[in-house]
């Protein structure tokens, strides 16, 4: 049957049928569902040709905005809540592990390897911060030598990749190996809340819909160890603005941490002598192949 003889429902079925010989069953399932939902969406809103052209242009410009240090498609996924939905769905089966949250668009460069206790933000000015914790499994046993990748914005709300002319790549980032007891600790500065990049298509979308672009202050973590599911998470600064209206919907109550002021001379694992702010996050990893019930 030729395309012009098909009605909308029959056309959707024809496209679904075209994927019938897909060898990978999961790919086949995804394409079938995507086709049905996409065709239903177009029909539901009565998409015009001009609106279709605008959408193609928007997606094209989103791709053009991506480079080695900027991922506009992740940003688009974030502001539509898709990133958080994927994280939430994949976290349902690991309720005893630390809550996950979005990767974000700025994990685009390798974090420099640093020794425990090192300062990840040596080129940034701000309130000194000591962050420490322990990596454990869901039964509370220490996970020795877990790899802890951290990155954050500075006290003005910028990541290193946003200021390549004034800040060395790797400032605000660190790759650590926990000790034999699963402990990790590092020095930094207290990060600021900040706007996600608005100089691209995602910014245009936020502007057109009257939405703000701000994220509350946070520090990113990726924690990995052999035999465990990799964890992507944050800690959020407890008194930050925008905790209740994160532009990417990524705040979870369990991830908000007190950043507690400490006097000069207070004992800490990094050996900081001056006044500092202390934050703690203990990480619980899910063991792969464990009981999923």
Image (cartoon, rainbow, N blue to C red):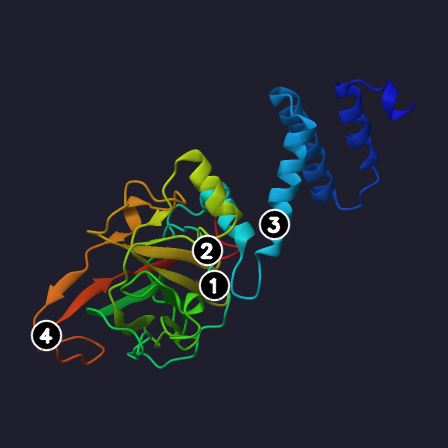
Tag count: 4
Q: Which mark is residue 266?
A: 4
Location of mark 1 (residue): 107
Q: CA distance from mark 4 to mark 1?
A: 33 Å
Pointer 2 and pointer 1: residues touching (CB < 8 Å)?
A: yes
Q: CA distance from mark 3 to mark 4?
A: 51 Å
Observer-side mark, 3 or 2, equals 3
At which x and y percent is residue 206? 44, 41
Question: Residue at horizontal 19%, vertical 81%?
Answer: 271
Q: CA distance from mark 2 to mark 4?
A: 33 Å
Q: CA distance from mark 1 to mark 3?
A: 21 Å
Up/down of 46 relative to 258, above or below: above
At which x and y percent is residue 57? 64, 43
Location of mark 2 (residue): 103
Q: Going from the N terminus, do you reach mark 2 or mark 4 first?
A: 2
Question: Residue at horizontal 61%, vertical 50%?
Answer: 61
> Can residue 6 be seen from the camera position used here?
yes
Q: How many other residues sit within 10 Å of disc 3, few (<14), some (14-19) or many (≥20)?
A: some
Observer-side mark, 1 or 3, equals 3
Q: How many other residues sit within 10 Å of disc 2, few (<14), some (14-19) or many (≥20)?
A: many
At which x and y percent is residue 142? 34, 67
Pointer 3 and pointer 2: residues touching (CB < 8 Å)?
A: no
- Depth check, front residue: 158 or 95: 158
Screen quadrant of the N terminus:
top right
> Can residue 89 be seen from the camera position used here?
no
Question: Residue at horizontal 36%, vertical 74%?
Answer: 178
Q: CA distance from mark 3 to mark 2?
A: 22 Å
- Quarter assignment of residue 197: bottom left
At which x and y percent is residue 240? 23, 51
């Amino acid at each position: 049957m030729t395309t012009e003889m098909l009605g909308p429902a029959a056309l959707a079925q024809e496209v679904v049928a075209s994927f019938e010989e897909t060898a990978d069953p999961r790919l086949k399932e995804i394409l079938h569902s995507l086709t049905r939902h996409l065709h239903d969406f177009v029909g539901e809103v009565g998409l015009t040709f001009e609106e279709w052209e605008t959408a193609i242009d928007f997606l094209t410009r989103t791709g053009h905005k991506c480079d080695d240090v900027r991922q506009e498609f992740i940003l688009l996924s974030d502001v539509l809540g898709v990133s958080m939905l994927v994280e939430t769905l994949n976290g349902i089966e690991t309720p005893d592990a630390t809550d996950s949250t979005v990767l974000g668009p700025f994990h685009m460069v390798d974090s420099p390897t640093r020794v425990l206790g090192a300062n990840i933000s040596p080129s940034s000015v701000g309130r000194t911060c000591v962050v420490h914790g322990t990596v454990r499994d869901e039964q509370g046993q220490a996970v020795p030598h877990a790899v802890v990748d951290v990155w954050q914005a500075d006290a003005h709300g910028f990541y290193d990749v946003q200021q390549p002319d004034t800040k060395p790549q790797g400032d605000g980032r660190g790759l650590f190996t926990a000790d034999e007891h699963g402990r990790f600790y590092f020095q930094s500065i207290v990060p600021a809340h900040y706007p996600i990049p608005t100089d691209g298509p995602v910014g245009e979308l936020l502007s057109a819909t009257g939405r703000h672009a701000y994220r509350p202050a946070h520090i990113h973590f990726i924690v990995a160890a052999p035999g465990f599911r990799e964890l992507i998470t944050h800690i959020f600064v407890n008194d930050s603005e925008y905790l209740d209206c994160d532009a990417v919907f990524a705040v979870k109550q369990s991830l908000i941490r007190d950043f507690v002021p400490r006097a000069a001379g207070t004992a800490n694992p990094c050996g900081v002598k001056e006044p500092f702010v202390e934050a703690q996050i203990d990480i619980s990893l899910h063991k792969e192949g464990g009981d999923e019930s």
